Image (cartoon, rainbow, N blue to C red):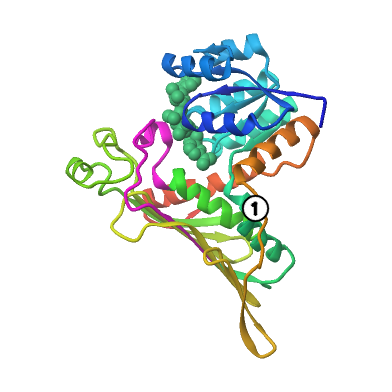
């Protein structure tokens, strides 16, 4: 075990921060040293559960505590500025997904990290799934030949978060696309080797989330979201063209009439194809069509890999498993879908 200890402070202490704290607590070489959170009730929870000092103003926390790193778990509109302020205060930044509200903000965060010599890790975790790693390894080994097309999706039938500000376009930047589509996109884009996006077309629709009758009448896992302030999309689709000529199509929804389905993607390659669920590589062998499924997958927990990877990168100069540069490219694709929806045609990145 390393003798060094990473002193980390939260900015935003809500739902996902509490989850991070659970995983951080598993390791001896990281210590939660403070929480900056505007809710007094939440601060009391942190004081009680983790016995840490709390602040309502994150600037004050940065100045007084001087953490080695911050864990940014605020709503999306508060990823950029706290990120910049923390980097300038000398802290590494672990920022939840999406990295920021748009690609310009991501780029500036990366620039400031370079200027200050600090590091950024983005909180994507689905890329660490053993199934994704299996496909990613096969891609890297050239198993598929040229990949022509990737189809990606995640659907919740009625799964609009009913806490926080997930229905507010001004505070979150968008709806299903930036909330869950971002995970699906990241995992598939990572698996196919992170090609450079060059053009995007897409559209978004809102037809359930802002309708008080529909929200009130149908039983669901997170009922009674705020339909009054709901300004984000229920459904988003996009088509991303990469520099290598391949295409990725993304579909996502958190309010729809259709079959609920978790994160999934399929790859269409010259020599083989793949699907995440069911996990298979489809190819031809000895004159037969063959489906390949691993007989065993490591039982790795994605949150464990995410948090351990962050600690190792910040503390021990280990590899950055989810760098700011990836956050930027993912955000460029999301921005592209929103921009294309606005202008009604394909847009360049
Ligand atoms: N990786 C994942 O799977 C995952 C899952 C859930 C959420 N998230 C991301 O985590 C972020 C937070 O989501 P959440 O579900 O925890 O939301 P949440 O509403 O539960 O928590 C956000 C917290 O930020 C606090 N906050 C608001 N303004 C603040 C300020 N100025 N200073 C300090 N604290 C402030 C709020 O009081 C709240 O407690 C979002 O960006 C979301 O996309 C990621």
| Element under disc 1 | loop
Image x and y of residue 284, in percent: 64, 83
Residue range of the region highlighted in magenta in the rendering: 150-176
Residue in front for this viewpoint, 163 or 143: 163
Residue in front for this viewpoint, 179 or 336: 179
Q: Residue furthest bottom?
A: 287
Q: Is residue 63 magenta?
A: no
Residue receiving disc 1:
299
Using the image, determine if residue 105 lies above or below residue 52: below
Left or right of 119 in this view: 330: left
Q: Is residue 167 magenta?
A: yes
Residue at the image position 40 percent from the left and 41 percent from the top: 174
Query: On the image, which quarter does residue 228 sit in?
Result: top left
Q: Can residue 76 be seen in the rendering of this structure?
A: no
Image x and y of residue 117, in percent: 75, 28
Q: Can residue 250 be seen in the rendering of this structure?
A: yes
């Amino acid at each position: 075990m390393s003798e060094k200890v990473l002193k980390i402070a939260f900015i935003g202490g809500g739902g996902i921060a509490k989850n991070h704290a659970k995983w951080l607590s598993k390791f001896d070489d990281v210590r939660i040293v403070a929480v900056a959170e505007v809710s007094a009730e939440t601060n009391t929870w942190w004081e009680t559960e983790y016995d840490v000092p709390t602040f309502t103003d994150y600037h004050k926390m940065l100045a007084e505590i001087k953490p080695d790193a911050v864990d940014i778990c605020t709503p999306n509109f508060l990823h950029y500025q706290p990120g910049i302020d923390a980097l300038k205060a000398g802290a590494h930044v672990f920022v939840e997904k999406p990295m920021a509200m748009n690609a310009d903000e991501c780029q500036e965060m990366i620039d400031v990290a370079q200027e200050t010599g600090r590091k950024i890790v983005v909180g994507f975790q689905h890329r660490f799934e053993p199934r994704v790693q299996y496909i990613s390894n096969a891609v890297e080994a050239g198993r598929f030949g040229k990949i022509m097309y990737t189809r990606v999706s995640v659907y919740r039938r009625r799964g609009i978060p009913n806490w926080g500000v997930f229905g507010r376009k001004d505070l979150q930047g968008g709806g299903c696309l930036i909330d869950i589509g971002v995970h699906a996109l990241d995992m598939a884009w990572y698996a196919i080797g992170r090609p450079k996006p060059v053009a995007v077309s897409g559209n978004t629709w809102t037809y359930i989330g802002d309708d008080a009758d529909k929200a009130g009448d149908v039983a669901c896992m997170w009922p009674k979201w705020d339909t009054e302030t709901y300004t984000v999309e229920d459904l988003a689709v996009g088509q991303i063209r990469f520099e290598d000529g391949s295409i990725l199509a993304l579909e996502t929804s958190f309010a729809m009439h259709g079959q609920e389905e978790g994160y999934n993607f399929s790859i269409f390659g010259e020599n083989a194809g793949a699907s995440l669920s069911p996990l298979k590589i489809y190819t031809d062998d000895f004159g037969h069509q063959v489906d390949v499924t691993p007989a065993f997958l490591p039982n790795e927990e994605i949150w464990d890999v995410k948090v351990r990877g962050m600690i190792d990168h910040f503390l021990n100069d280990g590899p950055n498993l989810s760098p700011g540069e990836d956050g930027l490219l993912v955000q460029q694709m999301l921005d592209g879908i929103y921009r294309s929806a606005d202008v009604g045609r394909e847009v360049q990145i």
